[in-house]
Image: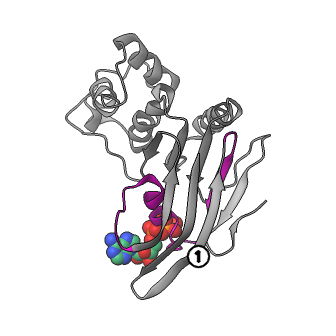
Amino acid sequence: MLEAVDLGLVRGGRDLFQQLSFEVGPGQLVQIEGVNGAGKTSLLRILAGLSRYGFSGRVIRHAPLMYLGHHSAVKGMLTPRENLAWHISGEGSYSPGEIDDALARVGLYGYEDVPSHALSAGQHRRVNLARLYLSRAPLWLLDEPFTAIDKGGVAELEALLVRHATAGNAVILTSHQSLSVSYPVAMLDLLTGLAA
Ligand SMILES: Nc1ncnc2c1ncn2[C@@H]1O[C@H](COP(=O)(O)OP(=O)(O)OP(=O)(O)O)[C@@H](O)[C@H]1O
C-alpha cells in the first residue's frame, strides 16, 4: 500500500533519520516508535504527502489514504455534525444519518448540535476520530490518535484499527503507549526501520 525508499530528514542540524526504507502492505498495523522529538510526526507527514520538501528519498503510495493529525482541527464555532460533514466532504457523499451514526460511535450522541467550543479536549479528539468510521480510504495514517481519549475510547479505537487491518487495509500510527490488541503490531524504529 505504501513504500518508503531511502527517506532522510535533517532538522535543526540533527539527522532525525537517514536511509529509512520500508513497505507497508494490506493487513498491517504499524506503530512508529521513538522519544519526544525523534521525528515521528515529521515522518508521518512525509508519508502522507503533506511535507513536499526538506527531506530526501521518496514515498510511493499505492492506495488512497486518510491522515489524522496530532492537533485537533475542530472549529469551535461549528457543531460536531458540521465539523464532521466539512472534514469528510472531500471523501465522498454521506447522508446525515451516516454522520450522526459516526458521532454516536465515538460517544457523541446528544452532542451533535452543541457548539464545539463547549466540548472538552477529549470530545474534540472524538469529533476527529469519528472521521475514521466514515473513511473509505484503505490506508490510515494517525498521529497520536489516543491523546486525551479515555480508557473506553482507547479500547474502542484499538478495536476499530484491528477491524480495519483485518479487512485487508493498513494503519500506520504514532503513539507513546503500547496497543493492547490481539493482533500483530509491527514496530517501526526511525533508526533501524520496520521490525519483521
Ligand atoms: N517546522 C519545523 N521547523 C524546524 N524544526 C522542526 C519543525 N517541526 C519539527 N521540528 C523539529 O523536528 C524534530 C522532530 O519533531 P517531530 O514533531 O517530528 O517529533 P515527534 O517524534 O513526533 O515528537 P513527539 O513525540 O514529541 O510528538 C523536533 O526536534 C522538532 O523540534
Residue at 56% over, 78% down? 18
In the image, residue 46 above or below residue 15: above
**Looking at the picture, how far across and down is residue 33, in whole percent?**
63, 64
Q: Quarter-wise, where is residue 90 in the image?
A: top left
Answer whether residue 163 is magenta in the image: no
Q: Quarter-wise, where is residue 95 in the image?
A: top left
Disc 1 residue type (three-letter):
Gln
Q: Quarter-wise, where is residue 22 in the image?
A: bottom right
Mark 1, Cα crowd under 10 Å, few <14 / some 14-19 / many 20+, is some
Residue at 73% over, 50% down? 185
- In the rendered image, the quadrant that contains the N terminus is top right
**Looking at the picture, how far across and down is residue 151, in whole percent?**
62, 40
- In the rendered image, the quadrant that contains the C terminus is bottom right
Q: Secondary structure at mark 1?
A: strand
Q: Where is mark 1, residue-wise?
A: 19
Q: Is residue 56 left or right of residue 190?
A: left
State whether residue 107 appears in this view: no
Residue bounds of the magenta highlight: 26-54
Q: Is residue 45 left or right of residue 4?
A: left
Q: Is residue 67 left or right of residue 77?
A: right
In the image, residue 55 above or below residue 146: below
